[in-house]
Image (cartoon, rainbow, N blue to C red):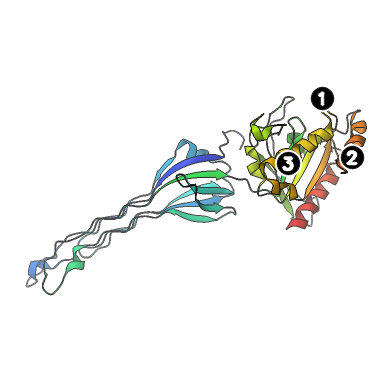
Amino acid sequence: MKGHRFIETAKALLIAGKGGDGCCSFRREKYVPMGGPDGGDGGRGGNIILKADKNTDSLIAFYYRPERRAPEGGRGRGKKMHGRNGEDLELQVPCGTVISDLDTGEILADLVREGDTTVIARGGKGGLGNVHWLTSTHRGPREHTPGAPGETRKVKLDLKIVADIGLIGFPNAGKSTLIGAISHAHPRVAPYPFTTLYPVIGTIKSDDPYSEFEYKVVDIPGLIKGAHSGSGLGHDFLRHVERTRALLFIVDMAGTDGRHPADDYLTLRDEIGQYARELLDRPALVAANKMDMPESAKFLKEFVRRTKCKPIQISALAGTGLDELKKKMAGLVASTI
């Protein structure tokens, strides 16, 4: 996602190919009335197919080019030759894309896994050639039909990232530093709020050389109090944790921005509940970040007393506690498979 604009929702006008026209033709043979009809049928118009692709991470292609057309079918020809079928137009979308009808809101498809496909607009049928009207009393038919138009779909595409664990936290809690420390991801890190403006996915591989177990984590922009009513960047980005198996709350245990860590944690849970109550039922871990700061130990005691949970103590910047965190994250994912 680095290097281009991240687009998580887009509208598109998808027009399948028109069927080819049927042909009116007569073969020229001696002793055959009117030469005999031999007009072939037109070819089918091309379908438009959407396919989930793990190497596509944004809907930017639809944002800048919302109208797509599939090729038309070929015209029928003489000697009963069938027109060529229009080539299908296959469009790549990110895994986790929900396609809905723009006018009615009806969900047409939900492409979650790599390779999932849907024919979103079907090409029109080819027209009939005049050979179909030949009868014992109608020896020289000139009737033929045009190809049918392809389906036209006005759709909305919404990306809901597919990952195993969603990282939840306030701005400056250290989520980006953490995902950069435990995965291959390289998010933007800076000492000011809302550095993360779009979701970042990282893949974490097992430290066991004999194991190929790996899982994905997604870091979403920070939440603040009142996000459900539009404060900060809002909470629309929470759509990207809807598909996760579990959540990881990252709490700034040093109280860097003047808030108590316990208040932050309770606020985060409240904002998630305001968005989708069922997310609070997901398995979850809590990581107490910035434990290398001198004031963190005092805040930690009060945090445990008020929240009744015992967080995993880490410092994403210093790299302490990360092995234990990854071990517990892997166990959490494994238990939900």
Amino acid type at image mark 2:
Val
What amino acid does circle 3 point to? Leu
Answer with the quarter of the image where residue 313 lies: top right
- Name the image quarter holding the C terminus: bottom right
From where the camera sits, is residue 129 visible?
yes
Quick one: quadrant of the N terminus? top right
Q: Nearer the viewer, residue 31 or 49?
A: 49
Say left or right for 108 vs 2: left
Identify the image quadrant of residue 271: top right
Proximity of marks 2 and 1: CB atoms separated by less than 8 Å: no
Element class at badge 2: helix
Helix, strand or loop at label 1? It is loop
Q: Looking at the image, is mark 3 or mark 2 nearer the viewer?
A: 2
Q: Which mark is residue 304?
A: 2
* Mark 1 residue type: Gly
Who's the residue at 34% across and 54% down the image? 45
Task: Point out residue 187 in the picture as x, y percentages from the top left corner.
Answer: 69, 34
Mark 3 crowdedness (10 Å alpha carbons): few <14, some 14-19, many ≥20: many
Mark 2 packing: few (<14 Cα in 10 Å), some, or many (20+)? Answer: few
Q: Nearer the viewer, residue 71 or 248?
A: 248
**Residue of label 1:** 258
Residue, disc 3: 167
Q: Position of residue 322 (x, y in %)?
A: 83, 42
SS category of the residue bearing label 3: strand
Say whether disc 3 or disc 2 marks the residue closer to the N-terminus: 3
Mark 1 vs mark 3, CA separation in Å:
22 Å
Q: Is residue 98 left or right of residue 137?
A: right
Residues packed near mark 1 inside 10 Å, few (<14), some (14 to 19) or many (20 plus): few
Q: Image check: 48 left or right of 208?
A: left
Looking at the rendered image, the disc whose residue lies closer to the viewer, 1 or 3, is 1
